[in-house]
Image: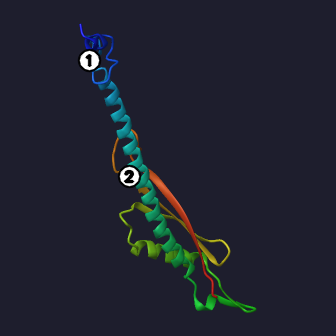
Amino acid sequence: MTAGAGREAAGGEAAGDAVLVRDGEAGAAVPLVVGLFAIAAGFVVVAAGATSLHLERLRLLTVADGAALAGAEAFRVADVQVQGDAVVPRLTGPAVAAAVGEYVALADRHDLEDLTVVGATVADGRSATVALRATWRPPLVGPLLPDGLAVTVTSTAAARFR
């Protein structure tokens, strides 16, 4: 028996020597590899869903920002008051709601599903606050992500002269 053969039988301690595999251990790594692949695929699905949800929220927020700006500009010249050196426009709820509704109807919806105006309000007479809701659908359907999720955003814009 050579020195290399003795080490191979003892567990393959020498570099370059082949390791003997017992019959019961053949394929023992396959379940581990499959399990790790399933975990990695789950991470990819969840990461893709989270990214999609974030982008959907940003698209909805873009529409809400435009709608709030349209609402903040919904005053008539007769509604503008001069207070000292400042020119102050006064917004009304019905005018803001009408401007927001018109903006959302004409806006590029970026494929937003079930886009609805939740609210268009005036709190202080100078700021228009708009809340919009849409439904998000995940790009990959599976047990790790919900089938759909309602996304609501709020944006405020103020009418000011400088």
Disc 2 from disc 1: Cα separation: 44 Å
Q: Name the residue under label 2.
A: 137
Mark 2 or 1: in front is: 1
Q: Quadrant of the C terminus?
A: bottom right
Residue drawn at point x = 43 percent, y = 63 percent: 115
Which of the two residues, 2 or 41, is positioned nearer the viewer here? Answer: 2
Residue 138, image x and y in percent? 37, 50
Colour setting: rainbow
Residue drawn at point x = 73 percent, y = 92 percent: 85
Residue 57, label in figure: none
Whether residue 42 is visible to the viewer of this picture, yes or no, is yes
Residue 18, image x and y in percent? 26, 20
Residue 57, image x and y in percent? 46, 59
Tell me if mark 1 has few (under 14), some (14-19) or many (20+) residues whose alpha carbon lies within 10 angstroms of its own.
few
Report if the CB atoms under discs 2 and 1 are less than 8 Å apart: no
Residue sitting at the far top = 1
Which of the two residues, 13 or 32, is positioned nearer the viewer here? Answer: 13
Whether residue 134 is visible to the viewer of this picture, yes or no, is no
Residue type (three-letter) at the residue carrying disc 1: Ala
Tell me if mark 2 has few (under 14), some (14-19) or many (20+) residues whose alpha carbon lies within 10 angstroms of its own.
some
Q: In this view, does 31 lie to the left or right of 92?
A: left
Q: Judging from the image, what secondary structure is the residue with disc 1 in? A: loop
Q: Name the residue under label 1.
A: 26
Q: In this view, does 35 lie to the left or right of 68?
A: left
Position above or below: 137 against 93 = above
Q: In which quarter of the image is the N terminus?
A: top left
Which of the two residues, 25 or 88, is positioned nearer the viewer here? Answer: 25
Res 17 quadrant in image = top left
Q: Judging from the image, what secondary structure is the residue with disc 2 in? A: loop
